[in-house]
Image (tube, helix red, strand yellow):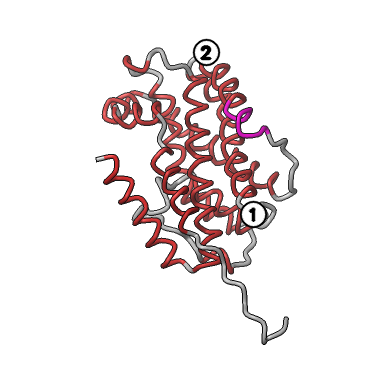
């Protein structure tokens, strides 16, 4: 590069940050908002699930995530269902799982977990990340524990951008030990939500589609911010994202 020539400036990230803020506001769809609203009732229903069932959900979730991460390491070994077909496929598996109560729901759970994780990976790929890299797959797993990129216990994790790690053996075990309990609790909540009277008309199909769409949106927001962070720095991107969310809140108010 000729040092006498001016270095082109990176485009202003403001418009894209504003779009990501809009996505954040829409991430919780109507069904997810209903589940959140009736969270107390759902917690009561969860308490009625036998401890053995709750333990089994956690065990199935961990095994499914481990296999899905391994498959992701080999590239596009799993078909990309696309933005519309993925929720439809999740709905289909949810309908099958919900047909026979807890027994079939547990049998269907590994498929649901795999479809959700791979939707997250496709979102990361769409934002320009190489999903065969262990650090990207690790970040995809962390999406499953995030309520948003500004959550106090989460944040925009920029450390992985310069990291080179192995996601096998002890490293994967340690990461799953942090991710699985929280995500398994969410899946338990999903199963329990189906027993809440006001949600009685909501099928396993609708719940699966809602959860997949929710996590896929979180992944687009998270990896979109990470991509902008690599170009513009973490502090400016975070500040502008926070400001965009506040502006949207004022407009809604």
- State which quadrant residue 80 falls in: top right
Residue in the image at 50% along x and 41% along y: 217
Secondary structure state at the residue bearing disc 2: loop
Nearer-N-terminus badge (1/2): 2
Quadrant in which the C terminus appears: top left
Residue 183 position, x and y percent, is 46, 40
Which stretch appears magenta?
A: 81-87
Which residue matches tag 1?
A: 128
Label pair 1/2, CB-CB below 8 angstroms: no
Q: Per the image, is 84 magenta?
A: yes
Residue in the image at 53% along x and 46% along y: 220
Residue in the image at 30% along x and 51% along y: 246
Mark drawn on residue 100: 2
Residue in the image at 53% along x and 37% along y: 61
Secondary structure state at the residue bearing disc 1: loop
Most common secondary structure along the magenta stretch: helix
The foreground one among 22 and 86 is 22
- How far apart marks 1 and 2 lie (CA) works out to 40 Å
From this view, report whether residue 36 is shown above or below residue 74. Answer: above
Quadrant in which the N terminus appears: bottom right
Residue 81 position, x and y percent, is 67, 32
Residue 45 position, x and y percent, is 32, 24
The foreground one among 101 and 148 is 148
């Amino acid at each position: 590069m000729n040092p006498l020539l001016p270095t082109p400036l990176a485009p202003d990230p403001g418009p894209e940050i504003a779009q990501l803020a809009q996505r954040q506001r829409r991430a919780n769809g109507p069904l997810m908002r209903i589940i959140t609203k009736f969270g107390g009732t759902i917690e009561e229903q969860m308490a009625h699930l036998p401890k053995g069932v709750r333990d089994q959900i956690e065990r199935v979730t961990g095994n499914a995530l481990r296999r899905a991460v391994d498959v992701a390491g080999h590239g596009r070994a799993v078909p990309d269902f696309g933005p519309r077909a993925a929720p439809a496929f999740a709905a289909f598996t949810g309908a099958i799982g919900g047909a026979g109560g807890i027994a079939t729901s547990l049998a269907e759970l590994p498929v649901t977990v795999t479809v959700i994780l791979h939707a997250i990976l496709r979102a990361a790929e769409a934002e320009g990340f190489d999903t065969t890299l262990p650090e990207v797959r690790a970040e995809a797993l962390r999406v499953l524990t995030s309520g948003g990129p500004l959550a106090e216990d989460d944040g925009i994790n920029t450390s992985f951008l310069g990291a080179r790690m192995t996601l096998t053996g002890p490293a994967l075990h340690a990461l799953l030990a942090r991710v699985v309990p929280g995500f398994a609790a969410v899946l338990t909540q999903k199963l329990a939500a189906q027993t809440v009277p006001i949600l009685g008309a909501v099928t396993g199909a609708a719940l699966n589609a809602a959860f997949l769409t929710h996590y896929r949106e979180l992944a687009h927001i998270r990896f979109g911010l990470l991509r902008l962070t690599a170009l513009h720095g973490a502090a400016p991107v975070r500040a502008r994202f926070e400001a965009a969310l506040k502006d949207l809140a004022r407009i809604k108010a």
